[in-house]
Image (tube, rainbow, N blue to C red):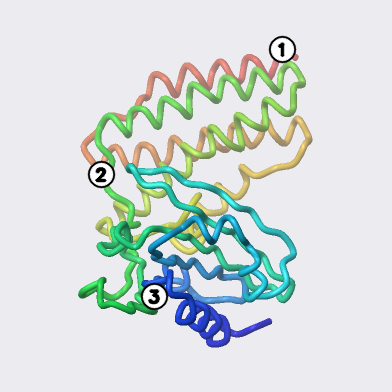
Amino acid sequence: MRNDKEVIAQILEFALCDPLVKVVLLNGSRVNPNVTQDLLCDYDVIFGVTDIAPFVSNQEWIARFGELIIMQHNQIEENNEQWEIFLMQFTDGVRIDLSIRKVEHIVEPTDSLTMVLLDKDNLMGTVESPSDRSYVTTKPSRQQFDETLNEIWWCSTNVAKGLWRKELPYAKYMLDVVVRDALVTLLTWYVGMNSDWTINSGKAGRWLQRDLPEDIWTSFAHTYVGNDSEHNWDALFETGTLTRTIGIAVADKLGYEYPYEDDQRVTLYLKQLRSVR
């Protein structure tokens, strides 16, 4: 596998030789001082260009970065801007996610995890050193807290319905996607409040094992199970127990109200439904 110096050198050599490329930025985990680098860290790169179309119409330029295993090419539209992104996995293990954007849209980066690798015309000005300040967990509003707890308890009834009917795909979707997403949000708030809102637990809570007390992490890990019905019932009740523990702690810390009645009624309903199969 190419090392980081070799990959960055290739990127810069390409950009220096192409007059359309004016700025090269590196962002994401590669510039996050709080992330331990490993072989699988992607290279999240932005080319600020004067014209996007040539990179799309003729994609032979991609071969200059290596031999592809697979690529995904997406067009993004956001905030009145349209750009292209090429997600490229190469045979030597290197992955480069290359965004091609009009240069005028990137001269004032909103992402704090941004490092300027090349600025041909001094368009970028002063860019602060990379940090994950844009990604730290922020204190939820009362409405956000209420909606998240409601999502967990309401959708837990859907998990139970799917398990009772032996509809495994539906039950797993509700437990492992819908309910879990809300539970991860709740856990990141718990981490945030205990760190004075200075910690970024990563996309989908990827660094929660690092951030949570061991007993809380163990409980959360037990909510991940396979296709056995009984194990999924157990995981559902473990999710409820964890929601109760963390939800009460967050509510007490932030001065909010934990939905005790929803918790009690839904938990009783789940127990009843499990017992009448």
Image location of residue 260, percent across then percent down = 37, 24
Residue in the picture at 29% in, 60% down: 104
State the CA–CA distance, disc 2 to disc 3.
Answer: 29 Å
Mark 2: few/some/many CA within 10 Å (<14, 14-19, 20+): few
Decide which of tag 2 and tag 3 comes sooner along the chain. Answer: 3
Q: Secondary structure at mark 1?
A: loop
Toward which corner of the image does residue 250 lie, by quadrant? top left
Looking at the picture, does residue 26 appear above or below residue 189?
Answer: below
Q: Amino acid at mark 1?
A: Val
Toward which corner of the image does residue 144 lie, by quadrant? top left
Residue on which disc 3 sits: 33
Is 68 or 250 nearer to us in this picture? 68
Horizontal side of 182 relative to 90 (left or right) equals left
Toward which corner of the image does residue 3 lie, by quadrant? bottom right
Is 269 or 183 nearer to us in this picture? 183
Q: Secondary structure at mark 2?
A: helix
Residue on which disc 2 sits: 253
Looking at the picture, does residue 24 appear above or below residue 7?
Answer: above
Residue on which disc 1 sits: 276
Is 270 or 21 nearer to us in this picture? 21
State the CA–CA distance, disc 3 to disc 1.
Answer: 53 Å
Q: Amino acid at mark 2?
A: Lys
Q: Are marks 2 and 3 in contact (CB under 8 Å)?
A: no
Looking at the picture, does residue 129 appear above or below residue 108?
Answer: below
Q: Nearer the viewer, mark 3 or mark 1?
A: 3
Give the farthest residue toward the top. Answer: 276
State the CA–CA distance, disc 2 to disc 1.
Answer: 39 Å
